[in-house]
Image (cartoon, helix red, strand yellow):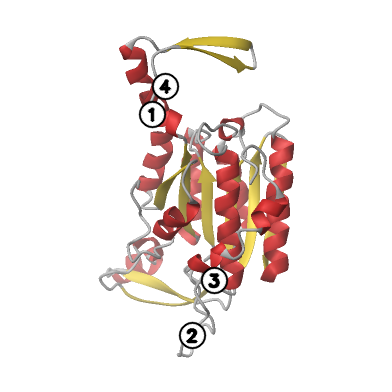
Amino acid sequence: MNAVHVTLADLIALRLRARRLARPAARVGGSHAATHVSRFRGRGVDYVESRAYQPGDDIRQMDWRVTARTGRPHTKLFQEEREQSVLLVIDDNPGLRFGTRVRFKSVQAARAAALVAWAAVQGGDRIGALGFGPGLNAEVKPGGGPRGALRVLRALAEWDAIAATGNEVVPLSQALRRAHRLARPGSRVILLSDGFSADAAAEAPLTLLAEHCDVAALVLTDPLEQQAPPPARYALRSESGQVLLDFSAARTRARWPQLFAERRQGFIDMLKRHGLGWTLLDTAAEPEPALARLLGLDGRRNIARPA
């Protein structure tokens, strides 16, 4: 497994491991029921009717027009779609091209995305992807079966190579606006990012996206972002040349993880404000436990907590 670059062969090799995250299709009854129950559930694509609000209904599906007209809260009902669309939104910004344990965050994000892609098509769903980062304005429309998964995996490897040649940081807001145009209502949208690209302008498109799609986020981290290295001087190379970091002072070592946490927390707070699922994934960990938490496969809600 390449620790620095995303390779197609490595992503294809994850196919068998994805079976742990996939569930078989099942038959359901009812005139408005779909013939397929997906592990990646959304909220349907076709409006059927509105009915009186019942405890437990998703407040995001409130029918405000009927509520205002009748004076009683009503919620919208949608017809489930036969196949669920899953859209991966992949952050390929320079900040993810970093890692001190096992692999880069960019490689870990691609591995997790590949597992979701294989699990989706094994469960009868469609899988698509959208990449954002230096030189990237590409997307793969959702498709089903092994071919659909392979199209996404090829894109992940190609996008990694393209983004590696640039230093521009593309804000999350741009990616979310693109995702809103690409994702059909009821799609499952999974954001894979370290959160450092989150900007204030992302709030509005995230709101629009969350109104019609089931959104969750896998937040990439590295051990060095959570704990400073041992006391010493470290020479690092940046765009402006070599930089010398002195970690001999206890105050510097204490401040180091705080800086990363503050950058990441803005993204997490945004997710929390919308009640969206999220969990952390370390570069040294295997992705399956984090994905199981995020997708609710461990029996808990997908508004996950750090491991």
Measure the alpha-carbon separation of dots 2 and 4. 57 Å
Residue kind at label 3, given as amino acid type:
Val
Q: Nearer the viewer, residue 158 or 15?
A: 15
Residue kind at label 2, given as amino acid type:
His
Residue bearing mark 3? 45
Identify the element where label 1 is drawn: helix
Which of disc 4 and disc 3 is earlier in sequence? Answer: 3
Residue bearing mark 1? 262
Identify the element where label 4 is drawn: loop
Residue bearing mark 4? 229
Is 224 situated left or right of 135 in this image? left
Measure the alpha-carbon separation of dots 1 and 2. 46 Å
CB contact under 8 Å: marks 1 and 2: no
- Identify the residue at horizontal 45%, vertical 90% (top origin): 30
Quadrant of residue 151 within the rendered picture: bottom right
Question: Which is closer to the viewer, label 1 or label 4?
Answer: 4
Measure the alpha-carbon separation of dots 1 and 4. 18 Å
Which of disc 4 and disc 1 is earlier in sequence? Answer: 4
Which of disc 1 and disc 3 is earlier in sequence? Answer: 3
Residue bearing mark 2? 32
Is 43 situated left or right of 12 in this image? left
Measure the alpha-carbon separation of dots 3 and 2. 12 Å
- Identify the residue at horizontal 33%, vertical 65% (top origin): 68
Is 216 situated left or right of 3 in this image? left
Q: Residues within 10 Å of mark 2 (few under 14, many from 20)?
A: few
Identify the element where label 2 is drawn: loop
Question: Which is closer to the viewer, label 1 or label 2?
Answer: 1
- Identify the residue at horizontal 31%, vertical 13% (top origin): 250
Note whether 136 is above or below 260 in the view shown.
below
